[in-house]
Amino acid sequence: MEKLQNFIDGQYCAPLKGNYIDNYEPASGKVYSLIPNSDAEDVQLAVDAAEKAFPIWSKMSIEERSSILVKLSEGIEARMDEFVQAESRDNGKPLSLAAHVDIPRAVSNFHFFATAILHYASESHNMEGVGVNYTLRKPLGIVGCISPWNLPLYLFSWKIAPALAAGNCVITKPSEVTPYTAYLLGKVAQEAGMPDGVLNILHGEGGAVGDAIVKHSKIKAISFTGGTKTGEYIARTAAPMFKKLSLELGGKNPNIIFADCDFKEMMSTTLRSSFANQGQICLCGSRIFVERSIYDKFKAEFVDKVAKTVVAHPNNPDAKLGAVVSQSHMEKVLSYVELAKEEGGTVLTGGERVILDAPYENGYYLRPTVIEGLDYNCRTNQEEIFGPVVTITPFDTEEEVLMMANSTQYGLSATLWTSDLKRAHRMANEIDAGIVWINAWLVRDLRTPFGGVKASGVGREGGWEALRFFTEPKNVFVKY
Ligand code: NAD
């Protein structure tokens, strides 16, 4: 069985204690590789390497740093097929999704920040007749980046690209559920000429190696994407150490559909925003609110289309949904379907496992699920399920739907469907969310601020926001 390795000081190496954990293939439910179960000793090795590398990396010219990161981006592109296969196998997502979204986006993330850093300028504030202030923006030193399993390399690179571009050395941990593409990245970093110790990739469980990263006194900032509960723990641990923190957490996003929308476009996008990546995208719209005058029409067409959606092995080109990421996650999603029934909901379609033919009969496949008849305030409508399950709820007025949309503890994103321009702007302004799409979903411009409000997180990623997070401003005043 293949054993993955950590990538520390520019070399692949086994975890110091020699412990490994199983890595499952969601499509078959079988173990297919072993992951280092690293701990604080491995983190210390990485910190030692990063400390040595920091003066080299941070003092390198921006052009040189940029060129290494461009090579990293090109290196992933050159191995596109290998990365696509690995991502789909590790996560269970359709091959076509990994090929069209995940890996191209990882390529763009590195390319975007490699070139952004060339244009990153700091401020100066003139005081007429008195003097001038200028702001230096210096890298923080060693930073920690921790990422989740749903968009493995996509989110991993979204953090480490700006951290590296800004001149930091990085100690990073992908999810232990989907480690493979991060493991492959070490080779690409070597080939791109990244100096040893600049990028260190550690594998293992959150409570062990993740916790050791968060607690290490020499790691100056933590950029974390994952669940709200983990984010709370990280904030509690890191805040008293005065670390900079960026927390991208859970969501329970509303998808609000008015009768005056472009019905056809709304329908095809809503199918994607509900079930893309098996509903395991933090931006999926899991609470669908539909204006009452079109509720029955929406319900009939939506349920019909969802029922016909192909759930299949990720390599099947017809697969719209592959497998969810793990057995425990599949069980969690199914438990929410049971909860929804207890809460008075009616399952209109789905709500069950899909058993494929051998040898995939133990894979984690779920039928996309639509539920109606639930109160906006019940647990099914308030808690994050993070799977292929949506609820549909009718509404009568703008005020009512706004109240329901804003009723959860979360505030990541929202989608609005209407052709009334004034209403679109009015509602976008009132919705508790860091990101609002009007007549669209998941259109991403990497320059825009990305992040959530309330329990969906603290801080913003993307564009200058990310480069600001990964640098420390220092103001210098010079008297005239
Ligand atoms: P998770 O919180 O369980 O794990 C995320 C990462 O944190 C993993 O690498 C894990 O090993 C690590 N971790 C766990 N415990 C830790 C600890 N005590 N200290 C340090 N690290 C620890 O989340 P998940 O199940 O991997 O991902 C799903 C969640 O991520 C969902 O809630 C989803 O909404 C959220 N998410 C948010 C965004 C966003 O941009 N806001 C994007 C994607 C996913």
Image: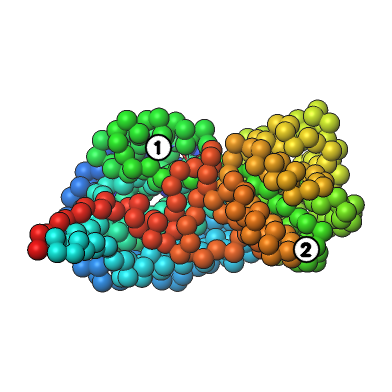
Q: Secondary structure at mark 1?
A: helix
Frontmost residue, 182 versus 434: 434
At a point 65% along the width and 42% down the height, the residue shown is: 406
Give the residue pinned by disc 1.
210
Outermost residue, left direction?
A: 480
- Which color scheme does this rendered protein use? rainbow
At a point 52% along the width and 44% down the height, the residue shown is: 453
- Nearer the viewer's eye, disc 2 or disc 1? 2
Q: Measured from the top left, where is residue 426 in percent x and y?
A: 65, 56
Frontmost residue, 460 versus 261: 261
Q: Quadrant of residue 331?
A: top right
Q: Amino acid under label 2?
A: Cys
Q: Is residue 142 visible?
A: yes
Q: CA distance from mark 2 to mark 1?
A: 45 Å
Frontmost residue, 190 versus 473: 473
Q: Is residue 90 visible?
A: no
At a point 86% along the width and 50% down the height, the residue shown is: 292
- Above/below status of 36 relative to 323: above
- Above/below status of 315 relative to 29: below
Label whose residue precedes the other's in the sequence (2 or 1): 1
Of the numbered discs in the image, which one, if any, rests on residue 261?
2
Q: Is mark 1 within 8 Å of ligand 1?
A: yes
Q: Amino acid under label 1?
A: Gly
Q: As drawn, is 28 to the left or to the right of 108?
A: right
Q: Quadrant of residue 338?
A: top right
